[in-house]
Amino acid sequence: MKIEKLKLPDPVIDFLKSQGFETLYPPQADSVKAGLLDGKSILVSAPTASGKTLIAILALLSYLSKNNGKVIYLSPLRALAAEKFSEFKKLEKIPLGKKIKVGISTGDFENIEKNLETSNVLILTNEKMDSIIRHGIEWVEEIGLVISDEVHLIGDESRGPTLEMILTQLKLLDTKPQIVGLSATIMNSDEIADWLGCTLVKNDWRPVPLSEGVCDGGEVTMNDGKTFEVERSLRGTPIDLGIQSVKEGGQSLVFAETRTRSKSLATKAADAIAEILEKKELTELEKTSKKILSENEHTELVKTLSLLVKKGVAFHHAGLNQKCREIIETEFRKGTIKLLSSTPTLAAGVNLPARRVVISNINRYNAKVGANRPISVLEYKQLCGRAGRPQYDDYGESIIVGNGNTKELIEYYINGEPEPIISKITDDKSLRTHILSVIVTHPGIKKEEILEFFLETLGGLQSRKLTIKFAIDISLRFLSSQYLIVKKGERYAATEFGKKTSMLYIDPLTATYFRDAIENISQKRKHTFGFLHLITSCEEFFPKFSLRQKDYESASLMIENNSSELLEPISEYDCSRSLLALQAWITESSELSLSDNLGIESGDMHRMTENADWLAYCLREISKHVERADLLEELSDLRKRIAYGIREDLLDLVRVKGIGRVRSRILYKHGIKNLDDLAKIPVNKLAEIDKIGSTIADNIKAELRKVR
């Protein structure tokens, strides 16, 4: 099917052709035939890289050419949302007779930005959309098209229930929006399509053909019948397979089960890959290596990464900070990094294809059972879906490293069907959280109406009515007993505390835990360490790192030094390494110190501070609710200390934009301890101070005038 034959306005056709689109891929053509451009709801179940983004763009442009409503694009991850935002921004140039305005919002669930009201294409994380619905924002009724990416994540324990709630509420809107669901291949896609009221478009076509296989004892058996040998070395099979592909002119992506192994595999590959590279490639990699060192503290992790990058190899995991990850992703896309060893989170995040994907181990650590367990077929298909780079490769290969079990692996993973999506909405935490949000958004709702709503969810379709009714009763009893909701006659309404909890976007259990702790706090003393303990102990806090044997002494000492700030007595057995890291962070420990002493890398620290800042904000809002005005200033200060990683004496200086953790401490050491001192120092003297200079000195003085 040719682009120019589509029922779309001429400016749209011209734009698509200018972007290099001439002919539709089979899944795209099938979607058009199913009524995509006629406002019909469809669920597309197709492999990675089969052109699902263009399906979304076609639906979006068709809708906006005929209607004045809003288009919502839902993404499970911030990184994916940012990727789509930059792609969709290009659409603003199309002269449709109306202005296309693309907006994005992915964080801060309490604030609903004004720009969302004025944009007609909104890219939102699932959680942000849920928050918008909870706030009762009026423009929700203007939504005419919902594009939901990665719909198969409804089966995910942590993210799934939120997505399920949104889609249930959006499909029940009076405006009956068109729904376009984009999903990986799943076994029960017909069931999901029925639930969403969509026509199913199922197509296994890929732009780059994929062959899958198993390597055992140096021999590779592919599902297309081909067999070949891999040259074996002391480096191990996963790296031998990766190197072989690079020698043949491809790139390799090696998936490892842990962070430690991803670093170890990359290290083993480095010298062999460096030997393959040309001089100009090595020169380019030298620059990238220096960039990594110049932009980051020299922790062991950063030094190792920069050393490996010199040789055309890298590793990628959540311990790396955003700067490092972005550099690695950019260089891998450019083809300068030839082999990338990564934990599986990469497969669910950014789009980084390689000619050959190597799955070094099919086991993963499962925190719930405290042991290794084989990955699901769905996860395997997501990993091998990264094989084959469109525009670069004629084929993609995915190879599992086996261990005398080739037949079983081929049968289970390669020939196996991905598992059906099973709803997690009826889990205790999900149900109490989402029942509260339904009561907040529908004050005066009856129990029967709550049941009717949850029967409209996927969980309602997959469970017995009696089971859901029983689970709802338990949640309602909990919410009532904690005074989050009240019952008047047959109708339920949220209390002020219930409304606040729902808008803060936290588990009702966490909200009651915070409320009870705050109500019992004594006055007239500091509680900073106690607040940090409260935050790191709650369900919502992540990432949580437990103490290692060598950390107990540090924990004991930290408790002793900060005992006056505790909300209640605790021992080292009540501590986590995350608590030690946050306390060290707000007392200005460096990333190097955190890495060396606590094994906490900068990527983890960033996620911890982001999460702790949000929970400190929740604590402050709940303190307001329970009329503990005496705690508000300390909690505001704590948020700033978490955000900047500073001691109390720098709080005044960081109010000025451009003065952060490092500069504020340097200024303090030069006798500039507050805004008055900063105002008095002449700009030329300020410029002479280390890490300032004339441009920054001018900017600081300009910003100072705004805050005084």
Image: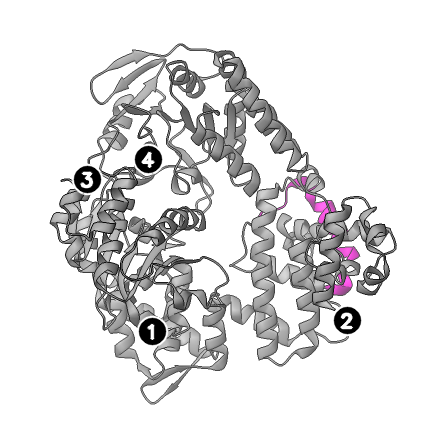
Q: Are marks 3 and 4 in contact (CB under 8 Å)?
A: no
- Label the magenta part by its dominant secondary structure: helix
The kind of residue tagged 4 is Tyr
Left or right of residue 35, residue 459 in this image = right
Picture coordinates of residue 676 (x, y %)?
83, 65
The kind of residue tagged 1 is Asp
Query: First in sequence: mark 3 or mark 4?
Result: 3
The kind of residue tagged 2 is Arg
- As measured in the structure, the alpha-carbon distance from the residue carrying label 3 to the one carrying label 4 is 28 Å
Q: Quadrant of the N terminus?
A: top left
The numbered mark at residue 24 is 3
The numbered mark at residue 525 is 2
Numbered disc in front, either 2 or 1: 2
Q: Residue at x 28, y 37 (%)?
A: 20
- Please name the residue that numbered disc 1 is placed on: 473
Q: Residues within 10 Å of mark 4 (few under 14, many from 20)?
A: many
- As measured in the structure, the alpha-carbon distance from the residue carrying label 1 to the one carrying label 3 is 50 Å
- Please name the residue that numbered disc 4 is placed on: 380
